[in-house]
Image (cartoon, rainbow, N blue to C red):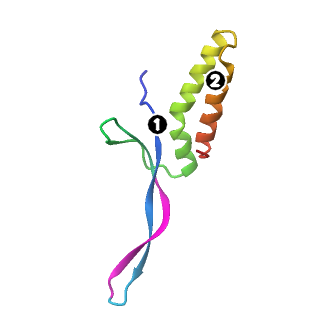
Amino acid sequence: MAHTPGPWFVGYSPEYDIDAGDDGQTIGHLTGKDEFDGTVFMVTDEDQVEIIAEHIRDEKTAHQIKAIPDMLEALEAMVEMVEMNGLGKRYALDLAASAIKKARGEV
């Protein structure tokens, strides 16, 4: 079964404070913060955005989804390492540690 290659990204949108101006016009001011927009996406070789998942309610879940390609790579490396009687252990462990950090939203 084929999968969509990484890297995948968690989507954020600029956050605005909305005020009614003195003239009754609505004014939006950028807060300088970004808010989670409920998506995980990738950028194709043609610089096009491809949505991997949307309508995600929890930002932690989005980070876990974002880590799927890395977790797959780490698991494949670990299986290969076991099949080779432990050769490549450091590489497999580094991949796994990196995937765990990504799933936790630490990178």
Question: Whole-percent x and y of residue 105?
Answer: 59, 46
Residue at 54 percent across and 27 percent down: it is 72
Q: How many marks?
A: 2
Q: Are marks 2 and 1 in contact (CB under 8 Å)?
A: no
Tell me: residue 34, above or below residue 75. Answer: below
Question: The disc labelled 2 sits on which kind of residue?
Answer: Tyr
Question: The disc labelled 1 sits on which kind of residue?
Answer: Pro
Q: Which residues are magenta?
A: 24-37
Question: Whole-percent x and y of residue 12?
Answer: 46, 55
Residue at the top extreme of this rendering = 84
Regarding mark 2 in the picture, which secondary structure is present there?
A: helix
Badge 1 crowding class, 10 Å Cα cut-off, few under 14, some 14 to 19, many 20 or more, is some
Res 7 label: 1
Question: Whole-percent x and y of residue 40?
Answer: 45, 44
Lower position in the chain sequence, tag 2 or tag 1 = 1
Q: Is residue 27 magenta?
A: yes
Q: Nearer the viewer, residue 3 or 48?
A: 48
Residue, disc 2: 91
Residue at 59 percent across and 24 percent down: it is 75
Q: Is residue 90 left or right of residue 35?
A: right
Regarding mark 1 in the picture, which secondary structure is present there?
A: loop
Figure quadrant of residue 46: top left
Q: Can you tell which of label 2 and label 1 is closer to the viewer?
A: 2
Tell me: residue 86, above or below residue 59. Answer: above
Badge 2 crowding class, 10 Å Cα cut-off, few under 14, some 14 to 19, many 20 or more, is few
Q: Is residue 43 magenta?
A: no
Q: CA distance from mark 2 to mark 1?
A: 19 Å
